[in-house]
Amino acid sequence: MKCALFAKHGRRWPLMLDPHDVVLRWLLGTEAKITTLNGFRDHSRISIIIETAAPLGETVVLERLREEDLNDTAILEVIPRQESHNMLGRSTAEQVLPMHIGPLLSSKIVQAQNDFRFYMLTQECRCPATNTTWDGREQVAVINFAHSSSSLRLKMLRIIVLHAQPCSYEEGVNLVQQDQAISQRVGQLEAETLSTLIQGNADAFSILDDGLAIERSQLLMHEVKTLRMQQSELAAVRQQLYDSHSTYFSVAQAMQSYFRAISDLVHVERSYAFSLGWFVDTILRGSLREMTSDDLCSQTKMMDHISKVLYRRVDVSLLSKDKLLFVLLLTVRPQLARSDISLDAWRFLLTGKMTVSKLRTTYVERTSDPIAPAKHENPAKAWLPEQQWNEMCTLATLPTFAGLIEEFEAQIKMWKRVHDASEPHLQPLPRHWDADLQGVDRLCVLRCLRPDYIANAVRTFVRRELGEAFLEGTDVDISKMVAESSPAIPIVVTTRPHDLAAAASFVVEVSQSSGHTISRVVVRSGHMQVANTSLNKAKSECHWILFENLSVCPGFARHLEDFLDSNRLELPGFRLWCVIDMQQPFPQSMLRASTKITFEPLRGVRAVVQKAYAVALKKKPDFLTTCTRGNEFRRLFFSLCIFHSLICERSVYGAHGWTAPYIFKISDLLMSAELVKSLLDSHDDHAGPAPFVAIKSVVGEIIYGGHIIDEMDSRLLKTVLDRFCCPDILRPGHALSSSGEFRMPLQDGSQSSWLHTVKSLPAEAPLEFLGLHETAMIERNEIDTSELLTAVFLTDSAHMIQDVQHESAASILSKIDILMSRIPTAVDHTQAQEAVITRSAKFLAVILIEELRKYDTLISSIKLTLNEVIQAYNGHEILTALLEVQARQIAFDTIPSDWSKCSYLSNSKLTPYIHDMALRYEFFCCWLEQETLSLHWLSAFFTPFAFVTALRLDYAKQNCLDVSIVIIKYCLLPVFQACSEMDAPTHGVYVKGISFQNARWEPRRGGLVECLPKMQTTPAPIIWFDPTDTASRSVKQGFHAFVCPLYRTASRRGIFSSEGLSSNHVMSIDVPSALPSCHWIERGAAMLLQLD
């Protein structure tokens, strides 16, 4: 009601968010003369319609606007613009108002009647006006017409009662109708009574003297009294009827929570759009029709059945990464609605913070500031990071967790046992906390101890609340989905950009297996007529049609939407399929009403190898038997399939698996198999060994190697291929992994025996088969947890995102004051720099001066940004869009993007970044004062490679050598920290600040060894960078020289050069190891200059 009043009587044109399709029905029922226009199709007609409707006082509705339409300059020309003084001083007494229509410089003035109305409708779930760039938004008011929680709950309750108690529902409808009729009759009688008393006998001096009028009014009021009594009786019956429906209140509340959960998924991916009509018709009514009368009488059975139907229908529309998110929302949202879960605990789980209102009063307790001191000293600094300790101190301020800090300090060994467990989410908590904390409260404690296991703990939580069935995944039943669909409802297959072709092939396979004819149309820009012809042909012939590449031609996608709206004919054999990129825009109304399927490539060793064999045998049934050297080919193909599944599986382990993201397809594997077959058939020596060198060259450098863009990844690919493409794989029973779980078949056999061998493979590849250490699972768990919590945070917009986005100016200014106090003061080092250059003729002095200049530039840029934000929030400057973005980034403790132009590479949060930058600057200032250092901090350099180059130049100059023959010999010393007596070396430098990842330096052995459990990174010892010529280079006897890459950050991601080197890669250092280099290459071992 409030939204309708604002839209009807507001002084600005309403942009109405209508995700539940209620606005247009309201307008058609309230407006006398209304013209409806399509926001995309009718651009050319809008101005003409407005010019005609405004003088007549009619209503114009512009519907189906998209967020991208609001950024279209054409919209600015069609929105009527009132003069500012007319907007502010508009009165209902004014009959005619001048309005401007058209471009700003050539607009027309139209005299609009006072009752002229202009409405804009959009089904976008987000508020689009805040992201628009056109000038018309000053005259637009955004009004959200989405159902409130109470109205949604009431709507769900009506539907449930209609199916569970139809007689009771009809009785309730009759009671409402009777009550309305009585109220109408009472109004008539009261009006007649008043009219009788007013229009009494004209000869009577007073109304009291008119006996007939009094007698007539008494009769009328007696009838009113009788009707009022009937209304009271009806109200009592209605209350009894309402009480009888109380059984279904909890079910209706759960349905409202379920719909809110799936409607919020659109904030994660644009393709996760579901309409209220789809939920009511397909999920709620469809589930109720399937249930028996006995099941309808049980709340538990009803909710269990509906939740399973909802899970099966929505699960097939989601990516694998978001399926855990969905079941978590199904579990938590009803509990939040019932207040079974504390909202503060839920917000802490997602952000590590308390509510925003509390944070504004106690800024020092923010966990985004890991340097801010906690109220208690961390008693477990050896194994509990400071940030997690600060989060625990914040959690202890909630009533449920009162006394947590004190008991943690008293029982620290018991808490450490939970922290060190291989599955900490399954360990009992110390003392009474194990019984007191369940569900989300238990997840909050786990976030403080082992945040990397939150995703695993969520699975346990869902399994206990909903059951194992909600974690097993749903198989796509295409035939059932096609049967449930209709010609007017498209079937949309959503996928990632690199899987579009595979998804289209999947649809074609489905049509062929079901015996349907399908036309495959690739939409091209400028060729819409061809696609439209194919569409009309498929409609007339009643067969399937598949459209691809719709993101290139968004206009045709809107044309399809209009086609489905205008063609409501019964065409039993017609189905419209669309394969779309879920990252590209697509009409939301079409997505919300469609049947959605998400296509993803298979994961897991067994599934990938089975898919490879199935595709190969489908193309060529005699694929395994046509090679002249059949036994060798079948073994090589099996080995290559395992190799393909392995390199695909490594991608889920982040930087531990591959430095850059890669997509390896089944087509790569089949192409490799064909080339292997060709090489075997054409090999001259049929009795000799297979040409493994040629096979590895073709597969490792051309087919699979063609995807690789990083030099270190190319080395890894060749190393893994060496394990699966060697003479040993031809031996029966050859172990492909150290544990022996993966082995070559004992003997060659028929096609069916090879398929049986494939089915016996493990579903998931263990870490030792992938060549990774168990600490790689920490990285994978952290990735899963980060993606899960980020996605849940995005879906929780109704409760939390708006509060966080509207962070108070005082909180932002308070944080800026803290940051400003930690930024070092730039000092004029001009005289000192000139003195260093004069006294020292070394290239290292030049590097020192350049580094100081870069840091001075960075500090100036940081202070400039912070001061501009301060001035803008204090009202001294205009708060531009750029400053608003920077202020939001500062509020979220993120490094402002503009600083990247003059900053070193860093993945840290803003507060630790400022602290780290101050330490780096202090290092260079000390170097400038002392001129010579015994130990250099390599991480502090903007360009570490320039520092190494300067060492080579100084050595070449000192020894009169050509710099091209000078190299750096790296000697890892047996010490990790410099002592006070440590002097600088006679030549070269000592370097600190480097860490090992996925490996550990053992000083007693003088080489690399396996890292300890749960320790991904360990500090490297002091390294002597010793310049020498190539002739003096040697390798330690009895050890292998592992060429270990050195990266700036743990993500290892950067911009790649044409030489295949990342901007994140600094250099490669020879590190001795008793284990062969291939072991560390597959481990993903590397050195890091800074940790995230």
Image (spheres, rainbow, N blue to C red):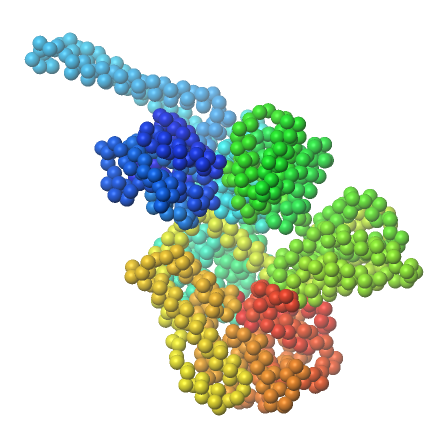
Please provide percent x and percent y for residue 578: 61, 39
At x 58% / y 43%, what residue is drawn?
A: 525
Q: Which residue is at the front of the view, 440 or 1034?
A: 1034
Query: In the picture, which quadrant includes the N terminus?
Result: top left
At x 48% / y 29%, what residue is drawn?
A: 160
When asked about the image quadrant of residue 74, the answer is top left
Q: Which residue is at the front of the view, 52 or 664?
A: 52
Please provide percent x and percent y for residue 720: 73, 63
Please provide percent x and percent y for residue 483: 63, 30
| Residue 126 visible, this orientation | no
Q: Among all residues in the image, which is located at the extreme left? A: 205
Side (left or right) of 824 relative to 592: left
Relative to 101, does residue 740 appear above or below in the rendering? below
Relative to 182, does residue 158 appear above or below in the rendering? below
Please provide percent x and percent y for residue 1073: 69, 75
| Residue 156 visible, this orientation | yes
Side (left or right) of 827 relative to 1078: left
Q: Among all residues in the image, which is located at the extreme front? A: 106
Q: Among all residues in the image, which is located at the extreme right? A: 687
- Total marks placed: 0
Relative to 937, does residue 784 appear above or below in the rendering? above
At x 48% / y 66%, what residue is drawn?
A: 901
Q: Which residue is at the front of the view, 123 or 107?
A: 107
At x 62% / y 74%, what residue is drawn?
A: 1067
Q: Which residue is at the front of the view, 71 or 247?
A: 71
When asked about the image quadrant of residue 823, the answer is bottom left
